[in-house]
Image (cartoon, rainbow, N blue to C red):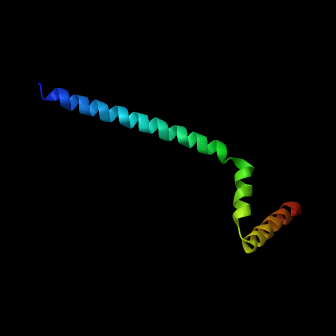
Amino acid sequence: MIAMAPLTILFAAISVVSALTLAYLVWQEGQRVNKNNGMAAFHRHLDALSDDSRAHLRQQLQESRDRQQRR
């Protein structure tokens, strides 16, 4: 029975550390969502694209608008 006390303390410590790590990761994920939401993230992504990629994207957007106007 005496040997079980240190083992119990070890598992309790592992559980506490795991719970704190999980809570920290969940908190960090919430912070990241607030920084990268919606149109701001889209514009940052668009700014990072090369000119050729932007031209392709503009072409796709124009084709999409044309299809919507035909409806």
Residue 16: x %, y % from top left = 36, 31
Q: Is residue 29 left or right of residue 69?
A: left
At 62% across and 44% down in the image, what residue appears? 33
Q: Reply above or below: 46 against 13.
A: below
State the residue at coordinates (76%, 69%). Answer: 54
Residue 58 x %, y %: 80, 67
Q: Is residue 17 left or right of residue 57?
A: left
Can you say which quadrant of the picture contains the N terminus?
top left
Q: How many numbered badges does the structure rendering display?
A: 0
Residue at 84% from the left image edge and 60% from the top image edge: 68
Q: 53 or 62: nearer the eye? A: 53
Q: Is residue 68 above or below residue 36?
A: below
Q: Taking 53 as reference, is 6 above or below it?
A: above
- For residue 2, which quarter of the picture? top left
67 and 62: which is toward the camera:
62
Left or right of 2, for residue 14: right
**Among all residues in the image, which is located at the extreme right?**
69
Give residue 66's position: percent from left, percent from top: 86, 65
Q: Residue at the location (42% across, 38% down)?
A: 21
